[in-house]
Amino acid sequence: MLTQLASKQSYKSCTSNLNPPHFFKLYKKDYEMLITGIKSKPLYSTLAPDMCGQRHLLIAQGQGGEAINRLYKAFGDDAASIEIYYASESILGSDQASTVRELSATRTLIYQRCSELENALRKEFGLAQMGIRLYICGTEPFIWAITNLALEFGIRDDEVQQEHADSQARQVACVHCNMLTYPVKTNIFQCSGCSRHLLVRDHFSRRLNAYMGVQIDAEVPGEVPDIVGIYAP
Amino acid sequence: MSYQKTLLVRVVSITQVASDIKHFVLEAVDGSSLPHFSGGSHVIVIMHDGTHTYKNPYSLMGDGYRSQQYHIGVRRENPSRGGSAFMFEKVKPDDTLELLPPANLFMIDTFSRKQLLIAGGIGITALHSMMCDLNRARADYALHYCVRSAENAAFWEDIVRESGTRAHLHTNKNRLDIPSLLQTQPTGTHVYVCGPLRMLEAVKRVAAALGWSPTHVHYEEYTHATGGAPFKVTLARSGRNIDVANNQTMLEALEEAGLEPPYMCRGGVCGTCEVAVIEGQLDHRDHYLTNKEKESMQKMMICISRAACQSIVVDL
């Protein structure tokens, strides 16, 4: 790890003269406040029909198909105004396409990749009129990719519901090199851009669609606390 | 409010622009530039008429970035509690008026994709400055101005000059069809309505029926506090009794008695003047409290609401 980092000149210069005290051990309590109690961490709900809307778009990915199924039933007799956009792509390998296809919505569109679904939605949003409601279910990067896309078309908070499903893995933005890493399943990971060991904070950027990752061993290089899988599966 | 510095302005000109509307142009007495303002802002004009003091809110018209002069439109209210009649009949060019600086309770949502402005009669004054802001921002918008007849369309020529084909005039012969207007709007459209209560209610009702979320519907009712039956207010903390006359609001009565309750809009919109009510039935006329809060009869907006009985006790 350290040899890899040492190849970066700037990093080397600030670390070469330091003699890490070997007795020093970083415990979770020491960096706990960096992680928790942060208000920007999004809260997700359970999708429910909003009967104030006129046109309902159920948008999901992977395991989120289960929420579509549940929501479709909750609409009951009003299921006619539902359109389904679903992508099979799933970190958990949870493809619900066959279940989703059986629902008799006004329109059901199924894609392999989330990116294909996004392209289709971009076209749809461009033509859509007031009265629309979005119900989004999937991983966090999926939820915010769709939410931010909708925002480009002026579709806002009170027209959008979000439910978190599929993987709990986080997308993390490195504050040192700006690189996004996904999926991150551990409290500490090595940045895919600069290889620093980053601590995942609860600080979430809706614009970047990522949590903040900061170097955990900046003061004592090489002193990395235990790495634990907490955002899994 | 005592902590707000007032502006002293000179009346530059007064023009009758419709049978019941006058256009006032105001300039700082010392010739300095007046504070800039955003579209939808208003000022409160403080009028000293003998022993009486009126404080009426008026929307600022025109471009808030060029604020060497302020423009306001005043309609002769019938019946008037005094304020608009004073402006209409007693104020002459070169007179000095006192203003509270601009405040905005009717702001443009700058994140939206398209703006629909709907004005009824004198309500155009609140939307006029929005129009200027939207022109400057090159935003997508349409302005619908509803009047009884073309002669009543104050400021129309000016609006057409500023907005061209974005402006639409509707008269009794050519009424605005609100459902068909709202039916075909793209996502991210916001509607701003200023006019009589009936118009506001119609837009709100149609928008809700078409599935518009309430945050996309903005409105300002064109109303000034009207009078009502006189009543007595008991201030629980000091034990003082204050009479509110039939042509007076409770806020005005308290001010006349030497108190300085906080206020801002003086139209039952902003919630600044909220007072806790200990005893008494209330005639709520504001747009701030929820229906549930109104039913509980525990608080009131003293700038506009009145007692529905002969005396009330408040926590002041």
Image (spheres, grey):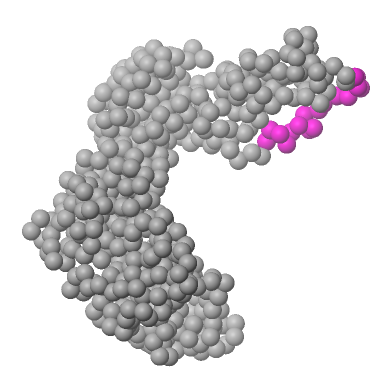
Judged left or right of residue A93, residue B228 is: left
B200 relative to B209, above or below: below
Residue A182 showing in the rendered view: yes
| Residue beneath the point at 54% across and 37% down | A43
Instruction: Let me know if residue A156 is in the magenta part.
Output: no
Q: Nearer the viewer, residue A141 or B11?
A: B11
- The structure residue drawn at horizontal position 36% and vertical position 69%, both measured from the top left corner, is B58
Across and down, in percent, residue A155 comes to 37, 37
Q: Position of residue B97 (x, y in %)?
A: 41, 77
**Which of the 4 quarters of the picture holds residue B183?**
top left
The front one of A21 and A28 is A21
Asked which quadrant contains residue B113, the reply is top left
- The percent position of residue B199, horizontal first and vertical second, equals 23, 60
| Residue B99 visible, this angle | no
**In the picture shown, does residue A233 fall above or below B121?**
above
From the image, which quarter does the C terminus of chain A lie in?
top right
Q: Is residue A27 magenta?
A: yes
Would you say B145 lies left or right of A120 here? left
Magenta extent: A19-36
Relative to residue B15, is residue A136 depicted above or below? above
Residue A132 location in percent, x, y? Answer: 31, 36
Which residue does the image show at 37% across and 16% down from the upper left?
A116
